Image (cartoon, coloured by chain):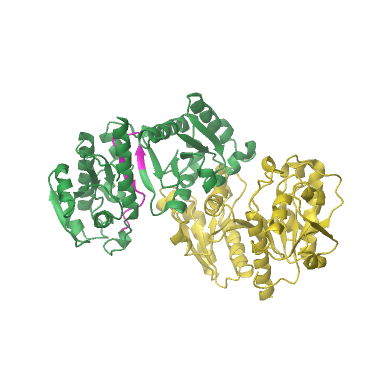
Chain colours: A yellow, B green
Amino acid sequence: MTRALRTPLAISLGDPAGIGPEVIAKCWDNRDGFALPTFVAIGDPRSVAAVWDGPIELVDDPRQADAAFDYGLPLIQLNAPRTDVPGHPSVAGAHTSLDSLEIAVGLARSGSAAAVVTGPVAKEQLYAIGFQHPGQTEFVAERCGISPGNVVMMLAGPTLRTVPVTTHLPLSEVPAHLSSALIESRGRAALRGLQRSFGIAEPRLAISGLNPHAGEGGQLGREEMEIIEPAIAALAAEGWRVTGPHPADTLFHARARANYDAALCMYHDQALIPIKALHFEDAVNVTLGLPIVRTAPDHGTAFDIAGQDLADPRPMAAAIRMAAENAIQRADAA
Amino acid sequence: MTRALRTPLAISLGDPAGIGPEVIAKCWDNRDGFALPTFVAIGDPRSVAAVWDGPIELVDDPRQADAAFDYGLPLIQLNAPRTDVPGHPSVAGAHTSLDSLEIAVGLARSGSAAAVVTGPVAKEQLYAIGFQHPGQTEFVAERCGISPGNVVMMLAGPTLRTVPVTTHLPLSEVPAHLSSALIESRGRAALRGLQRSFGIAEPRLAISGLNPHAGEGGQLGREEMEIIEPAIAALAAEGWRVTGPHPADTLFHARARANYDAALCMYHDQALIPIKALHFEDAVNVTLGLPIVRTAPDHGTAFDIAGQDLADPRPMAAAIRMAAENAIQRADAA
């Protein structure tokens, strides 16, 4: 990092049986090559030791992480009930991953950590222990006192950022869920996030159509005319730099990407197909609209390869770097 | 080309007011750099002369193209009513583009040309003169005596080929249009096309899901379980190498692409977003299921830039190269 953060980043290990512990440990191993700032992991040290031979530096407080970082992976230990076996998720592991997330968010909210990076969790196991949120994002929002409807997920890679308006819906339900109000709200959150976390004073947002060829003047669907265009007009009337509705198929090639800072997409795969096609190894999930900075690698627990030294640490490294950059950006603006 | 074709390729100029004449002329200019085989254009020479200063060699028969190719762009002249102004489509121009297409297809059907490459046409103008087909593809199919339902469009780039199951439908109508029979039929046509035109003896077809995460076991949609999986099972039972349903967002990164020869996608943008994000300059539209080889650049008439020397000839060059490769492949197999 060119500029130092005053406090380390807090990283939750995620599910102890997933690849979270491995990729975080590998990030510490390659901290120089990946150009990573000081971070402190939170979780069960046994889940790291099960997959990694490197040194772990147990700390009680993030303030100790800077001194420890040269010697080992700084880790705040949780009282975890037992060591999970890599690749075999359990109810106990779900408790550990939730405690780890809770503490990481608390450290960031109190200012003890500069930002939160979250390791991947297993939703099925979390639901089994009574977790009520659709995912970690909504949990973090609630802990920060923000309505989940006011936070947005951005997928950010080196040459493309996308924000889905709708996320985990069957495709057939997407058209009925779209509304001008929802598009405006997601668009506004994306634009403010580009200003606040990415330091772009006058962000440009490209808004996609829903239908092939953005509806081709109504011949291939009317949502563009009835829902998306009014939302674009409303955002433009507020002074935002917005364009669209753009045909989605021609929105993501290199020349098109140069014309905007983020693309607002109507559904999950419209946002995720291009980001993962172009930036599978370094796309970062950024939560915008929170009082704290939160990023995550854009992959899951990958239980099928956990504990086999196969996990690629680059997405986690990208998430750590972006958390640091966003935190610096926010500190500069404050 | 490493191996020569016995006959030249026939290229319809497309709409005379579009960028077709310009990109075809530029392909002749750069025939060595683009590694192009002999081709003959069919259309109004005035539409080429209006946008290009190079030499045109008028020929009556494709057999004359080989001798002429070193000296100028070989062109079979149509009795066109008047010269169109670049960027200003007209009814007369639509007649010219249709005649040009008709002759190019006839040359390929008779064996006088090795394949057809079609320049971009303006559908609105074609409809105005009574054209009854959704696009050039259906017209070519009819002229070849093939039901349009039995031909499929493939988008082919250097590292990815995709085939959409449904094409120009509003997104809200896609789920209702999907059926196991349609997926099987498109899949079979894609697989046979990979064998016949691309020379892949045992082609591998990856079939995408419709919903986010391919439905996540029914939680995010049931089309995968009820429609797509039975189609995959049926194709597998015929001995084809098919996999899926795959979550669409993780199907198009480099490592995933290495596992299949083509991806069968459920809707227009699912197929076109990744191909255009990755291969905007060299994606080719290939029509599979015809008795002749037909390709086209994956762009439109671009009236807004016609006549300004701005059109990029690389997509047309890619379409010409692929037509030649497919024709050689078919000749080898015959």
**Residue A153 screen position, x and y as percent:** 63, 56
**Residue A1 shown left or right of residue A249 in the figure:** right
Note whether A52 is above or below B181 in the view shown.
below
Q: How many marks?
A: 0
Residue closest to the eye, B288 or B96: B288
Residue closest to the eye, B260 or B300: B260
In the picture, which quadrant includes the C terminus of chain A? bottom right
**Residue B323 shown left or right of residue A165 in the figure:** left
Q: Residue furthest top?
A: B237
| Part of the protein shown in magenta | B286-302
**Residue A169 screen position, x and y as percent:** 61, 45
Give residue A198's quadrant in the image: bottom right
Give residue A172's quadrant in the image: top right
Give residue B63's quadrant in the image: top left
**Residue B309 shown left or right of residue A259 in the figure:** left
Would residue A57 be visible to someone looking at this image? yes
**Residue A295 screen position, x and y as percent:** 67, 59
- Is A228 magenta? The answer is no
**Residue A62 shown left or right of residue B260 in the figure:** right
Name the residue at 70% across, 66% down.
A37
Name the residue at 44% across, 42% down.
B162
